[in-house]
Amino acid sequence: MTTTYIGTDHVPAQQKTLGRVIIFIATILLVALFLIQILYKTDTITLGFENWRPTLYAYLLWSIALCWGILLIKGDRGQRALFVLPAFLFTIAMVIFPLIFSVYISLHDWNLSAFEGQKFNGLDNFRALLVDEYYWNSMLNMVYYLVAILFEYAIAFGLALLLNSQIVARKFFRVVFLMPLMLSPVAVSWMLGKSLMEYRFGPAATLARHLGWESPAFFSSPEIARFSIMVLDAWTFIPFMMIMLLAGLQALPKEVNEAAKIDGATGWQHFWKITFPLMLPVSVTATVIRIIFKLKLADVVI
């Protein structure tokens, strides 16, 4: 028994036209309502809604119209597209719309404690940001933190090479090295920052006194505090990079390694000529993900 698959070519032309019209009208209405609401909130026009809830309802109706229109246009194949649509609509609602709304907020003076509410001020917020010393200080701190990723990558790569070799209790050390990643960053900040690095009775402070540091306050100055935060964050997320690099090392073709041994390549040559180039895709992926996590360092600092 054979199954005849009905493609878009077998859908009647009138049905396709109806689907396109439904999607077009729904999109026009959604965009028009969105623009009207923006103009109303910026006091450009007097017609609009007091909140953004009608825009949300319009978006839900547009989603239904989009699904209906795709089914009319593609026929049976449109059912496949419906499986992708939830992720697409979720991305619009949770990523694209907040991005647009954040741009909208940045163009307003929005004091939540003021009775007059929001007030359009153009690019004044950005001008104030460029002359704010705290902003540039935070940018400088992020440069330090991003540079620290290079050292974290080197340590993670070394640990991955170690765990990929035939060492005693390899499985045990894999679990131990992953334990910091299982902890919440807030728990890490309290466990290490508030306990281990406590300047009166903390073990790290006691060790520092024995080494000659009279008043070991790890968060007393900006420079020392910056380095301490780097250590806290690195201790948490080096295992993340390590496990990604370890997975990449285990996926390398064994034939290449065996050929290098037969050709008499030294360990250093084997690493720089074979292992490191083959690991570049994994290294770039791990580094980019680590940068994303590094830019969200507030939970450790708090």
Image: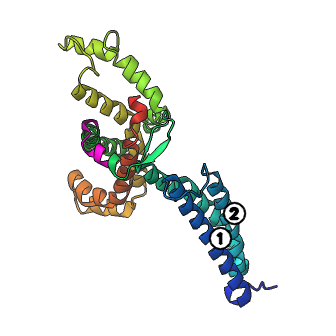
Give residue 109's mark. none
Under mark 1, the amino acid is Ala
| Horizontal side of residue 16 vs 282, given as left or right | right
| Horizontal side of residue 60 vs 293, given as left or right | right
Magenta stretch in the rendered image: 126-134
Report which residue position mark 1 lands on: 26
Residue 91 visible, this orientation: no
Q: Residue furthest left?
A: 212
Q: Is the Cβ of the residue at disc 1 closer than 8 Å to that at disc 2?
A: yes
Under mark 2, the amino acid is Leu
Q: Residue furthest front?
A: 46
Compared with 60, 199 (above or below) is above
Report which residue position mark 2 lands on: 61
| Local secondary structure at mark 1 | helix
- For disc 1, the neighbor class at 10 Å (few under 14, some 14 to 19, many from 20) is many
Compared with 57, 236 (above or below) is above
Q: Position of residue 99 (x, y in %)?
A: 47, 54
* 33 or 42: nearer the viewer: 42
Residue displayed at 61% across by 53% down? 49
Q: Position of residue 17 (x, y in %)?
A: 68, 85
